[in-house]
Image (cartoon, rainbow, N blue to C red):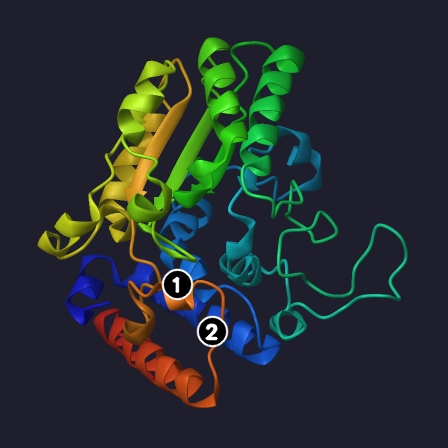
Amino acid sequence: MKSSYLRRNPRAYLRSTKMRKFIIEMLYRAGSGHPGGSLSCVEILNHLYFEGGMNYGGNSHEWEKRDRFILSKGHAVPALYSVFTLLGWLKEEELWNLRKADMKSPKGESRYIQGHPSTKTKGIEVSTGSLGTGFSIAVGKADALKTKYGKKDRRKVVVLAGDGEHQAEDVWAAVRDAGNLKLNNLIVWVDYNGLQIDGSVEVVSSVSPLTDKYRANKWHVIGEEIPWEERGKYPLLNGHDFEWLKRANTEARKQDRPTVIIANTVKGFGVPFMENDPDWHGKAPGEEEYREAMKHLNELERECMKLLGMVF
């Protein structure tokens, strides 16, 4: 991440930088995990939870009125845990127990946060991990909310999916059904970083053209995937641009049918040596890499604070 980006919205990027520090620290201590896809979706989650008007049922009497957020790309859950920590739902020290085996907690409870989302953790709607499953469940939830509360109900089901996840056939069955059912309470964000564990999504098993596929299934489409070879032309991809995220979210919430937002991102964004490198899909930083990443993130944090006039 170039420091010049921070001037666009230093307060939001300060939150993003804190989230990235949590992610790197978590994975370093755990010795395993998925940094690339966790770092790429930080701005999306940051916007949704802190600036995007998503109702996450902060008060107990408002709980049933909440929007349902589903992290379908479950391996990126460290990014979601970082949000929960900033919200006060998780204590910072709980993050350092990531991926620890839990054999002693009572049934239905967990002392530790896991490497994929589990409903045993507060704030997690659906246990995910098998790619495509969260997407399919989200369509069922959106349909159920409409059936129970009526067509004018304001609750939303918000999904964060991966680009490589669209290689799963169950995603497209869910896309078809959502379009036919006109589920205007369903919003899917695609974290399109262009890479998966084995390399480029376009090379491994292309999912393009996503825009045409979604439109053919009666969805409203915002954004368009940028081909891998053309990404260098853009100084800041829209999935990391808070102004674009705000416009996309506002548009999505006004539609009369399901909406997909294709947000182009950088795998490993915010940690230079991890950016656009598929090797960082599923491995934790070692000691030297951890120190290098944290040094860079600390510098970004100080620059954000300076732009905000904060003392450090």
Residue 212 position (above or below residue 168): above
Residue 24 is labelled as: 2
What type is the residue that disc 1 sits on? Arg
Q: Is residue 143 visible?
A: yes
Q: Residue, x 44% and y 37% (percent of image)?
A: 167
The span from disc 1 to disc 2 (Cα, nearest Å) is 14 Å
Between 203 and 17, the residue placed more toward the observer is 203
Q: Quadrant of the N terminus?
A: bottom left
Q: Which residue is mark 1?
A: 15
Q: Residue 266 placed where, x, y %?
A: 29, 57
Q: Quadrant of the C terminus?
A: bottom left
Q: Residue, x 19% and y 71% (percent of image)?
A: 3
Q: Residue 124 placed where, x, y %?
A: 64, 46
Q: Residue 232 placed where, x, y %?
A: 13, 56
Q: Residue, x 64% and y 62% (percent of image)?
A: 90
Asked which secondary structure carries label 1, the reply is helix
Q: Residue, x 37% and y 57% (percent of image)?
A: 40
Q: Is residue 80 visible?
A: no
303 displayed left or right of 180? left
154 displayed left or right of 99? left
Between 11 and 249, the residue placed more toward the observer is 249
| The quadrant where residue 300 appears | bottom left
Mark 1 or 2, closer to the camera: 2
Residue 259 position (above or below residue 168): above
Q: Residue 280 placed where, x, y %?
A: 41, 68
Residue 59 position (above or below residue 195): above
Mark 2: few/some/many CA within 10 Å (<14, 14-19, 20+): many
- Specify which label sits upstream in the sequence, 1 or 2: 1
Residue 269 position (above or below residue 224): below
* Residue at the front extreme of this rendering: 204
What type is the residue that disc 2 sits on? Ile
